[in-house]
Image: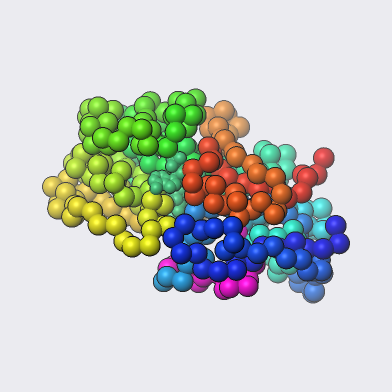
Amino acid sequence: MSVNRRITLAARPVGFPKESDFLLSELAVPSAADGEIVVRSIYLSVDPYMRGRISGAKSYAAPVAIGEVMIGGAVGTVVGSKNPGFATGDIVEGMFGWQDYAVSNGKGVRKIDPSLAPLSTALGVLGMTGLTAYFGLLDVCDPKAGETVVVSGAAGAVGSVVGQIAKIKGCHVVGIAGSDDKLQAMKDLGFDAGFNYKTDTNYFAKLKELCPKGIDIYFDNVGGALTDAVIPQINLHARISVCGQISQYNLEKPEMGPRWLGMMIVARAKVQGFLVSDYYSRFPEGFSQMAAWLKEGKLQYNEHIVEGLENTPKAFIGMLNGQNTGKQLVQVSAPPA
Ligand code: NAP
Ligand code: FER
């Protein structure tokens, strides 16, 4: 391939993103200057946080500018190197963006051992979303055997791993997701119970039925009305990990909800928001524990892989709509044989 296909941000979405908010264009394949590498991507990650980066609203990271290549994690092969830390042929993971080829100075780039697991896992269970589950559950919530854990967004990349780690820790795990197929996938991963929030719409009653001993831990990926139904059912010393609020990301006006901080006093509960990147110094611990659980068969993963760089906006929008069971990825070139 002699051109670099790239997807840039064409417009800041209003409400739900549209394919026309993105633009596919071509440039020459870049070359490496001193200290740099050129990476040809194999898999791109599409993630909910990208909705925040294409919005103009204040957040924890700067937005993507109009006309700039969309940011995002990817796994690929080093095809040119003038950086002594990397050799041609190395498999690497980094923030290479929505494009076929990226130039990097090597900062924040991780070498992947291709013998460990399929390369795609470096973006999922052995990547950012896996570590989000690991630290967001274990560090923020400190789960104990016998406790009841509720996970929202439970069939997705983060949620599906949260539920499995909670099972490893001996908890009773209840997952919430948006289809019956996703409920089946959760069951296959060892969750104890779950419900489809799109068809079982009395969330409070359903949680009461599935969590007869109340809720000790809530891992929140979605927010909104599901979270409002969880809060009144938390136990004394409950822990709530605020990982994501995807139900709110595409709203044009903030949604109003109950004033539930009083419940935190009643339960002497802890509510903590976190970013996976806060745990950077502990990533080696997370990667090695997750890889060990994978190898021991204690952890499984699902992926939803769309083909073709040109389909990345569609894959992103599809993920926001819940098309994915497990980690949503885009394959843009063939993995090495
Ligand atoms: P994911 O769960 O694999 O994919 C997103 C899922 O969200 C969709 O499949 C869909 O599943 C669900 N969803 C979409 N709209 C919804 C709505 N209105 N109500 C309920 N569910 C809805 O994505 P992920 O990468 O694992 O991320 C999950 C959450 O974690 C996101 O909120 C993300 O922002 C957050 N996150 C946070 C950090 C951090 O450091 N704090 C890091 C990574 C991810 P359904 O079919 O079930 O609706
Ligand atoms: C990161 C911190 C947080 C990151 C992603 C997130 C790509 C995701 C946050 C969210 O989904 O809310 O460093 O790296």
State the image coordinates of residue 99 (x, y, percent, origin top left). Answer: 70, 60
Left/right placement of residue 39 relative to residue 8 reads right
Residue 327 in the magenta stretch? The answer is no
Give the colour scheme shown.
rainbow
**Direction from residue 146 to residue 289 in the image, left or right:** right
- Seen from the viewer's position, the closer of residues 104 and 28 is 28
Vertical order, 272 against 81 (above or below): above
Q: Quadrant of residue 93?
A: bottom right
Give the extent of the magenta segment: 59-72
Residue at 47% x, 67% y is: 55
Task: Evaluate whether residue 209 shows in this view.
Answer: yes
Left or right, 132 with reference to 251: right
Q: Residue at x 57, y 28 (%)?
A: 297
Report the residue that reaches farthest toward the right.
2
- Residue 20 location in percent, x, y? 59, 61
> Can see residue 289?
no
Q: Is residue 138 left or right of residue 73?
A: left
Horizontal and vertical percent position of residue 85: 75, 62
Residue shown at the point (82%, 58%) measured from the top left: 79
Rendered residue at 74%/58% (across/down)? 100
